[in-house]
Image (tube, coloured by chain):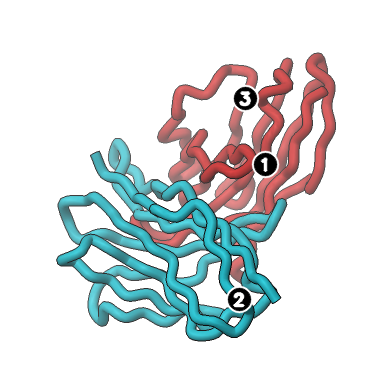
Amino acid sequence: DTEVTQTPKHLVMGMTNKKSLKCEQHMGHRAMYWYKQKAKKPPELMFVYSYEKLSINESVPSRFSPECPNSSLLNLHLHALQPEDSALYLCASRGQPLTEAFFGQGTRLTVV
Amino acid sequence: AQSVTQPDIHITVSEGASLELRCNYSYGATPYLFWYVQSPGQGLQLLLKYFSGDTLVQGIKGFEAEFKRSQSSFNLRKPSVHWSDAAEYFCAVALMNSGYSTLTFGKGTMLLVSP
């Protein structure tokens, strides 16, 4: 199973809402990632978790709050987002350093 | 700084014609290189990877890529393009960032396939 599953596929939220994005993998990977991708742009790294600990935060605003409850799950909690936060949010996992990352299908987020 | 450059923003190829997408990297050590494909609104799918060894690597969907250290290039090729190959293609290099492995992507090349 080389699958990374993200839910929901689509999400529309108001600027005062609180929502969460979920990501799950069962490949035993110990590194998990959140990326943000705007239209016609490459993915931009947001967070890296390694062995369930936050290892890299690429200066992401605090309205994005990641969580790694266990080695298979990665959440991204959203609160008080802005319309410019509308994007495709991608989760990825990796087994060994410098090897390929496996990506989920993404969550298309629209902030209204 | 390490970087990946994809010189072509868009490429249009006729169905059945051959394809070459260019990728150049700037990296001091031996790079770990990847090509990913992304259909609209979808995630990224790995096409192929290069770590070491044979410089011509085969991937899925009939794609191949050749690593040329002298040219700092890792170009993607396909001998005969199908309409379903229309998508965005990203070249990427794996780097160590603060002791953790991350991917740096090129800006992508959008492939359009004409009938």
Labelled disc at residue B8: none
Report the amino acid beneath label 1.
Leu
**Of marks 1 and 2, the one in the foreground:** 2
Q: Quadrant of the C terminus of chain A?
A: top right
* Element on which disc 3 rests: strand
Label 3, on which residue?
A64
Which-is-in-front pick, marks 3 and 2?
2
Number of the label disc, if any, that sits on residue B14: 2
Location of residue B76 in the rendering, given as x and y in whole percent from the top left corner: 42, 71
**Residue in the image at 43% along x and 49% along y:** B105
Label 1 and label 2: CA atoms lie apart by 30 Å
Identify the colour of chain B in the image: cyan
Q: Amino acid at mark 3?
A: Phe
Looking at the image, is mark 1 or mark 3 nearer the viewer? 1
- Residue type, mark 2 in image: Ser
**Chain bearing mark 1:** A
User: Residue B100 location in percent, x, y?
Assistant: 34, 43
Q: Label 3 to label 2, Cα distance in Å?
A: 43 Å
